[in-house]
Amino acid sequence: MEIILNTLISLSLLGVVLAVILYFVAQKFKVVEDPRIDEVEACLPGANCGGCGYPGCRGFAEACVKAETLDGMFCPAGGNEAMKNVANALGQTATEKEPQIAVIRCNGTPEKRKKTTKYDGPVSCAVSSALYGGDTDCQYGCLGLGDCVAACTFDAIHMDEESGLPIVDEDKCTACGACVKACPKSIIELRNKGKKSRRIYVSCINKDKGADAKRACDAACIGCGKCAKVCAYDAITIENFLAYIDFEKCKLCRKCVAECPTGAILELNFPPRKEAVVEKASETTEIEK
């Protein structure tokens, strides 16, 4: 009995001594966080998407507090409103940024880009891309296996069953960039959303010569340069047989769209062209006759 009692007393004393030691160690090495971090984090949406370039909203909040200015700091999920609140909490100013959205730079639907092989592996674009170029003759196009869909935490991107291509939901997309990173073919790009959500871009990244690109996909850019010639704003460049439209310079005049012989340049959310309306009206008149 005495042995058990001595053991209990010894263990109790040891526990007390260790607790005291741990207390002093904790006090010596404790890290005092800036209370403003909590205030900034409360201004953020809590999506933890990583679109800001930091590990979650907490990491971004810490970076904002430590930064001398908020230049270069931006939360894509919260947008300008969140950054305005962050700036107010820190007594700084935040520069407003043009809203962005993800665009799919591939228009290779089944009727335009014929399948030449059959993929029978894991349903993953990353795996498929590592094994071979794809199930069509275009090694640059969308693989259609949905890695971008899985990466999106905002449910803003889905695969269209008819076209086999991703579709971005403009109301849900926050331009966090997760889908951009997930795509092994790099066909997804973040571009300015544009006034009234209107955008013009080359929906192709095929860098092969014109004949080879056209053979692989009817909607491929063939690098003919016609779009660049009609652009009065120097917004279009041709490199590696591929046209690219700089969204910072583009004035949305749409001349390049009408000039493209393959339809590789897409225009989104624009009203019908006047000539199209006139043509439709004339067709209606002919039918009535």
Image (cartoon, helix red, strand yellow):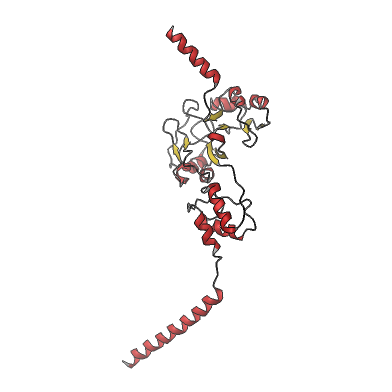
Pinpoint residue 65: horizontal percent, then vertical percent.
59, 60
Q: Residue at x 53, y 39 (%)?
A: 102
Q: Residue at x 64, y 26 (%)?
A: 227
Q: Residue at x 57, y 55 (%)?
A: 88
Pinpoint residue 254: horizontal percent, then vertical percent.
59, 26
Residue placed most toward the observer, 7 or 193: 193
The residue furthest top is 289
Q: Residue at x 55, y 56 (%)?
A: 60
On screen, 259 above or below 234?
above
How many marks do you count on the picture? Answer: 0
On screen, 38 above or below 24?
above
Pinpoint residue 31: horizontal percent, then vertical percent.
55, 70
Pinpoint residue 121: horizontal percent, then vertical percent.
43, 40
Whether residue 29 is visible here, answered yes or no, is yes
Residue placed most toward the observer, 50 or 133: 50
Residue placed most toward the observer, 130 or 177: 177
On screen, 276 above or below 177?
above
